[in-house]
Amino acid sequence: MQTSVPELMDISKEPKHIHELYGTEPGKATFANNCLLARRLVESGVRFVHLVHGGWDHHGGGGDQNLLAGLPQRAQEVDQGAAALIKDLKQRGMLDETLVLFGAEFGRTPMLQGPRNSKELGRDHLRTAFTVWLAGGGIKPGLHLGETDDFGMRPVSDPVHVHDLQATLLHLLGMDHTRLTFKFQGRNYRLTDVHGNVITKLLA
């Protein structure tokens, strides 16, 4: 690692068209740079890569806490790099064997939070409905699964519990979530607790 990692982390050696695809700026701390680095890591044989992009907790207030200012900025920061990662993996013939998941731990309420003025608008946490997207690794492309009510508060069709998502991810990685068990306080637990079903509609 000590000899290979410095070279691997140096994205400046990528050709110009790749930097234009990702919107990367070598030497800066950007999500786009991390997406390109993720491709380089996967290409070199790393089996799990976790990218983090913070600053989405818009509860209201000034600066990034203001929904109207912060949300478009966060979205702009991730959009090009995330799309480029999928395109780049596909062009290199790596997408079919690389599972990409983009998501968070909860959604946001449809109603506003905080003072009703344009400088302090926010939204609170919502655990009952939120979105993740998946690509590659055995996922059916172009599929939109699930629908919420008109307010975006609760699922009304094809709900996917987090344990179902976990079971599906494990299946795509070649593991049966019902067999990965451990006994704790007399009860057999698994990576999906004691729940979860593989969502076959998501499978290619």
Image: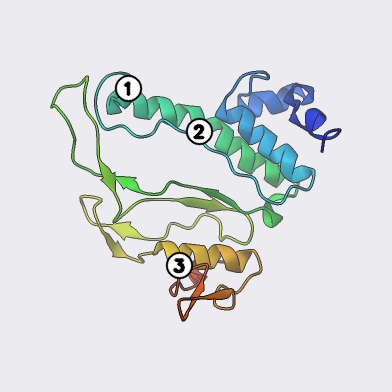
Which of 62/180 is in front? Answer: 180
Mark 2 or 3: the one toward you: 3
Disc 2 marks which amino acid?
Answer: Asp
Dot 2: element: helix
Earlier residue among tags 2 and 1: 1
Residue extending furthest toward the front? 185
Residues under numbered marks 2 and 3 in contact, where contact means CB atoms less than 8 Å apart: no
Label 3, label 1: how many angstroms apart (C-alpha)? Answer: 34 Å
Do we see residue 204 in this rendering?
no
Earlier residue among tags 2 and 3: 2
Q: Which residue is mark 1?
A: 69
Disc 3 marks which amino acid?
Answer: Asp
Disc on res. 196: none
| Rendered residue at 56%/72% (across/down) | 177
Quarter of the picture containing the N terminus is top right
Residue extending furthest toward the left? 116
Alpha-carbon neighbours of circle 2 within 10 Å: few (<14), some, or many (≥20)? some
| Rendered residue at 41%/24% (across/down) | 73
Q: Position of residue 104 (x, y in %)?
A: 43, 46
Q: Position of residue 36 (x, y in %)?
A: 67, 33
The structure's colour scheme is: rainbow
Dividing the picture into quadrants, the one containing residue 147 is bottom left
Which of 140/59 is in front? Answer: 59
Label 2, label 3: how many angstroms apart (C-alpha)? Answer: 27 Å
Give left or right: position of 196 versus 107.
Answer: right
Disc 1 marks which amino acid?
Answer: Ala
Quarter of the picture containing the C terminus is bottom right
Earlier residue among tags 3 and 1: 1
Q: Which residue is mark 3?
A: 164
Dot 3: element: helix
Q: Which residue is mark 2?
A: 79
